[in-house]
Image (cartoon, rainbow, N blue to C red):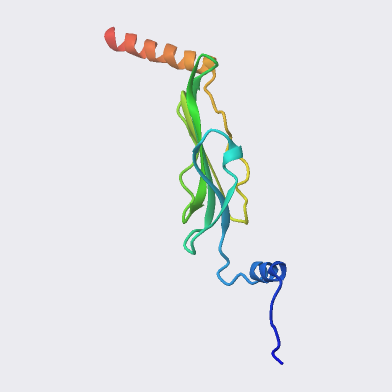
Amino acid sequence: MKASLAVPPALLLALLLAVDPARALVCFSCTNQKSNFYCLKPTVCSSSDNYCVTVSSSGGIGNLVDFGYSLNKGCSPICPGPSVDVGVVAVSTHCCQSFLCNFSAADGGLRVNAAVLGLGLLLSLLLALQQLHP
């Protein structure tokens, strides 16, 4: 009589999840998406990856001009540079180091305030006028 060592699939899955020899990081990933809804695909990172990264970029001038919005998520060995806001374009970066920690978008929908843009234009004009009439 032959003994069967069949393991139910649910038990096998539980054992595989409990035994994590490489301690692989798992992050959500996506490329150039317009919504966080499309960025919920779990990805097992490589052993050299230490961070889950979310990078969102957007641009516009108040409610007048919309340059678009892009969301990217994934694994990375390093945490990319800090968030940057240069007036009409903004890039927001968020890094974390735990299981599926990059669930939400990183400060989506950043837009320059029309008053800030106006002040920048005014200061640029004054500087240009000063250069013309020293």
Q: Position of residue 15 (x, y in %)?
A: 68, 71
The answer to whether 14 is drawn above or below residue 118 in the figure is: below
Q: Position of residue 52 (x, y in %)?
A: 55, 51
Q: Would you identify the image quadrant in which residue 20 lies? A: bottom right
| Apparent side of residue 11 relative to residue 35 in the rendered image (left or right) | right
The answer to whether 60 is drawn above or below residue 31 in the figure is: above
The residue that appears at 67% across and 67% down in the rendered structure is 13
Q: Position of residue 124 (x, y in %)?
A: 38, 15
Q: Position of residue 29 (x, y in %)?
A: 53, 48
In this view of the protein, which residue sits in the foreground, 73 or 16? Answer: 16
The answer to whether 3 is drawn above or below residue 42 in the figure is: below
In this view of the protein, which residue sits in the foreground, 95 or 120? Answer: 95
In this view of the protein, which residue sits in the foreground, 122 or 86? Answer: 86
The residue that appears at 54% across and 17% down in the rendered structure is 62
**Residue 134, can we see it?**
no
In this view of the protein, which residue sits in the foreground, 57 or 117? Answer: 57
| Apparent side of residue 6 relative to residue 42 in the rendered image (left or right) | right
Instruction: Tally the numbered discs.
Output: 0
The residue that appears at 36% across and 14% down in the rendered structure is 127
The answer to whether 32 is drawn above or below residue 26 in the figure is: above
